[in-house]
């Protein structure tokens, strides 16, 4: 909204006729339509802007020389001085309200012009208010060790400090994480909290991380509060096998077999003949039980009977 002002600076009392002893009546050139400009409620630390216009209401050019603000909460923007207004010309600029404290604020801005000399005074009013702060606790959630497919859930809280805070939306990065326990939007009274949950369901053994962000009308909403969710990948287990070399002649290598039940059936797990008497199985899963046997292979590709079976339990 643009406010077009007609404010007599040095003029007779309002609603009184202008009188002159000469042949020309005295006339105010720099005009504004209101003596008071209200900029409403603004949060401390934020700003509000409202346009306002001044007009040269005379018949000759008028030069605006200065614009002085009394106080620190209000300021003039977009008024480059000196500014010459032609007869009948209007110029629009902005009044900015940036409250430094809570409560009512009242100041004034004086705009001075020369030839003829005039002063236009605009009364400014607004109210600074303190908005709430949004706190997320804990700031970091550690899921620790997790195995593939097993869900883990941690709890958190949103806390409103200073005044009530309305949380409008929430986002969480990472496909393995889910936010729950919140129905948005939600308004949290000052000094109160609302709970939420974060659930992690790992799909593989890789470590994962996510950022949980909340958008709100809090004073710190421009820098969203975030909870970092970190998961340490499931422990990587491996089974290291070794055996005594075969005493048979012409042995060229060994095969390793694994089964899920004692006595088999077994499945060969080495891709090529093992030339040594050691093998590492890194394809095991936590909490499982495995059974291993080995065989020897000679130069004629004949394979021996299974060795004695061993049992391994993965933590």
Image: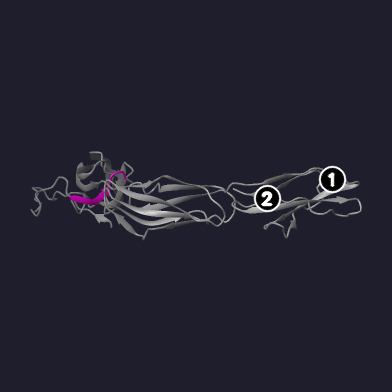
Q: Nearer the viewer, residue 108 or 12?
A: 108
Q: Is residue 191 visible?
A: yes
Q: Give the number of marks.
A: 2
Q: Is residue 61 visible?
A: no
> Magenta residues?
35-45
Residue under numbered circle 1 = 246
Q: Nearer the viewer, residue 108 or 21?
A: 108
Compared to 1, does 274 lie above or below? above
Q: Residue at x 33, y 43 (%)?
A: 80
N-term mark: 2 or 1: 1
Q: Nearer the viewer, residue 155 or 115?
A: 155
Q: Residues within 10 Å of mark 1 (few under 14, many from 20)?
A: some
Where is residue 40 shown, x and y percent of the image?
A: 23, 52
Distance CA(mark 2)–CA(mark 1): 21 Å
Residue under numbered circle 2 = 311
At numbered mark 1, what does the secondary structure look like: helix, strand or loop? Answer: loop
């Amino acid at each position: 909204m643009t406010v077009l002002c007609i404010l007599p600076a040095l003029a007779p009392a309002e609603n009184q006729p202008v009188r002159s002893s000469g042949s020309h009546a005295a006339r105010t050139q720099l005009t504004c339509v209101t003596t008071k400009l209200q900029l409403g409620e603004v949060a401390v630390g934020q700003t509000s802007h409202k346009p306002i216009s001044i007009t040269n209401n005379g018949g000759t050019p008028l030069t605006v020389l200065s614009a002085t603000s009394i106080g620190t909460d209000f300021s003039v923007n977009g008024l480059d001085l000196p500014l010459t207004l032609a007869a009948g010309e209007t110029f629009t600029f902005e009044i900015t309200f940036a409250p430094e404290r809570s409560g009512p604020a009242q100041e004034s801005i004086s705009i001075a012009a020369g030839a003829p000399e005039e002063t236009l005074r605009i009364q400014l009013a607004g109210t600074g208010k303190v908005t709430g702060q949004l706190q997320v606790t804990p700031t970091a959630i550690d899921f620790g060790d997790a195995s593939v497919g097993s869900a883990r859930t941690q709890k958190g809280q949103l806390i409103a400090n200073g005044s009530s805070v309305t949380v409008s939306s929430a986002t969480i990065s990472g496909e393995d994480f889910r936010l729950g326990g919140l129905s948005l939007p939600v308004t949290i009274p000052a000094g109160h909290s609302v709970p939420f949950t974060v659930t992690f369901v790992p799909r593989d053994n890789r470590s994962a991380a996510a950022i949980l962000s909340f958008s709100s009308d809090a004073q710190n909403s421009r820098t969203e509060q975030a909870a970092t969710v970190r998961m340490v990948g499931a422990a990587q287990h491996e089974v290291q096998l070794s055996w005594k070399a075969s005493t048979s002649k012409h042995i060229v290598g060994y095969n390793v077999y694994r089964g899920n039940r004692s006595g088999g059936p077994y499945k060969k797990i080495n891709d090529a003949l093992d030339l040594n008497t050691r093998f590492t199985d890194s394809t095991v899963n936590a909490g499982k039980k495995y059974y291993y046997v080995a065989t020897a292979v000679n130069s004629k590709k004949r394979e021996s009977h299974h060795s004695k079976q061993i049992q391994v339990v993965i933590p």
